[in-house]
Amino acid sequence: MAESFLQLQAKEQSQIYRALSPQLARSPAVLEKDVWVCWVLQTLFTMSGRLPMAFKGGTSLSKVFGAINRFSEDVDVTLDYRGLDTSFDPFAEGASKTQLKKFSEGLKSFVQDHVHSVVVPHFEKILVAEFGKDGYRIEVSADGELLRVHYPTVLGVSGDYMANSVLIEFGGATSLSQMKSTRSARTLLSSSLSWCFLILASASCRQRVPSGRRPR
């Protein structure tokens, strides 16, 4: 198995971030976080037992489609509501307000249970297996809608305007029957380096993209 970029010595990682910073017109802290964003995507979308989900929002527009040039650091994920109840379609005509309210409440519990019982244990297991316990931790909200992966910076100091963590925001609504493609996200570094261990940063993510149109 190819050595991953994050398995390099901290000094080597730091040197690469700093050396490529001028060329890529990004601060070393942004390049570091970008690698971790992709690690989070890969860990999430290759998770055994995960429910169907979609990667959406500004980060997907930036990393997958190149539709925006600014760096977007949060990961927005939608869980397919049909994982909760396949017998009820909240978008069907004639659905009552009572049914929709009950479904909405169930959806929140569905997200909470899946994140706490499946996603968090998976991330904790992978972090320990790949990096050990030092400096890495998971922080999750009570409702399961916010999960933050904290990582230790290799740059010696904290990031310029951003925390050394990646935030995942979970929600539940979209039916994946609307998904049109499966695409890959890659690090900013991969545009300048072709070493095999940078393949680490490739993550397959289901995208809600109507054919021939940019996602909204």
Image (spheres, rainbow, N blue to C red):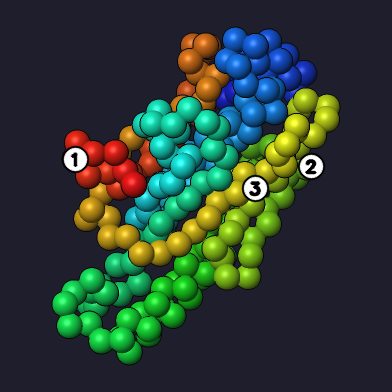
Q: Amino acid at mark 2?
A: Asp
State the residue in front, 205 or 98.
98
Task: Tell me the element at label 1.
Answer: loop
Residue shown at the point (37%, 83%) measured from the top left: 101
Give the Cα distance between marks 1 and 2: 45 Å
Amino acid marked by disc 1:
Ser
Residue 197 in view here: no
Secondary structure of the residue carrying numbered label 2: loop
Relative to 5, is 193 above or below? above
Residue 139, image x and y in percent? 68, 57
Q: Is residue 7 left or right of residue 66?
A: right
**Mark 1 or mark 3, which is nearer the start of the sequence?**
3
Q: In this rendering, is residue 171 above or below 215? A: below
Q: How would you rate the neighbour count of disc 1 (Cα within 10 Å): few for under 14, some for 14-19, many for 20 or more? A: few
Any mark on residue 149, and which? 3
| Disc 1 target residue | 211
Q: CA distance from mark 3 to mark 1?
A: 33 Å
Tag 2 or tag 1, which sits nearer the N-term? 2
Residue under label 2, please give it.
134
